[in-house]
Image (cartoon, rainbow, N blue to C red):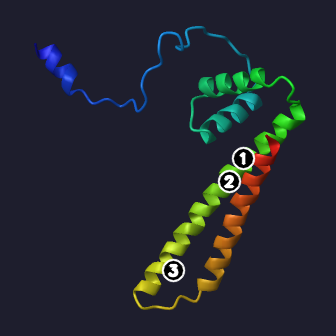
């Protein structure tokens, strides 16, 4: 009885449902990488917020589904995705500055950096828009 109660009160950390038996990955493939390749792929997996094996599986499956895609096109897509992530991060940083300016204005102040921050927001938004447009035009 105590086992059952313990199992019922256990917090679930998984945010998505488990894969069904038909979709569960059961095969293991070994891949050899040199230090540079592993570093590059690990950084890409971290940027995509996934594990290295999951990143490798998704990347390989995407390539297998689109055999007409050339290596140059794939490299261009990778650069665009990297730029989109970097632009998104930049927009977050600029948004933080904008929040600080808004706090100062709401407190009755007139920050001298207002024009600089607004110009930075416009540049960051344009950077995200440009990267998004490039990504949409590649498909």
Q: Which of marks 3 and 1 precedes in the sequence?
A: 1
State yes or no: discs 1 and 2 in contact (Cβ < 8 Å): yes
Circle 1 residue? 82
**Residue, x 44% and y 79% (percent of image)?**
103
Q: Left of 9 or right of it: where is 45? A: right
State yes or no: discs 3 and 2 in contact (Cβ < 8 Å): no
Q: Position of residue 90 (x, y in %)?
A: 64, 61
**Residue, x 70% and y 22% (percent of image)?**
61
**Residue, x 89% and y 30% (percent of image)?**
70
Q: Left of 3 or right of it: where is 26? A: right
Q: Relative to residue 16, is residue 109 depicted above or below? A: below
Circle 3 residue? 101
Q: Relative to residue 19, is residue 133 depicted above or below? A: below
Q: Position of residue 21 (x, y in %)?
A: 48, 10
Q: Which mark is residue 86?
A: 2
**Quadrant housing residue 41:** top right
Q: Relative to residue 67, is residue 98 depicted above or below? A: below
Q: Which of marks 2 and 3 precedes in the sequence?
A: 2
Q: Label 1: how many residues lie within 10 Å, few (<14), some (14-19) or many (20+)?
A: some
Helix, strand or loop at mark 2: helix
Q: Residue furthest top?
A: 27
């Amino acid at each position: 009885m105590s086992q059952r109660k313990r199992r019922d009160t256990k917090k679930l950390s998984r945010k998505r449902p488990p894969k069904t038996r038909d979709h569960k990955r059961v095969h293991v493939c070994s891949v050899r990488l040199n230090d540079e390749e592993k570093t590059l792929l690990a950084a890409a997996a971290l940027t995509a917020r996934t594990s290295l094996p999951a990143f490798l599986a998704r990347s390989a499956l995407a390539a297998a589904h689109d055999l007409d895609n050339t290596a140059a096109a794939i490299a261009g897509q990778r650069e665009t995705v990297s730029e989109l992530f970097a632009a998104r991060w930049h927009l977050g940083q600029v948004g933080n500055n904008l929040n600080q300016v808004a706090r100062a204005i709401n407190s009755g102040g007139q920050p001298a950096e207002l024009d600089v921050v607004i110009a930075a927001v416009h540049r960051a938004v344009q950077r995200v828009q440009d990267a998004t447009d490039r990504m949409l035009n590649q498909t």
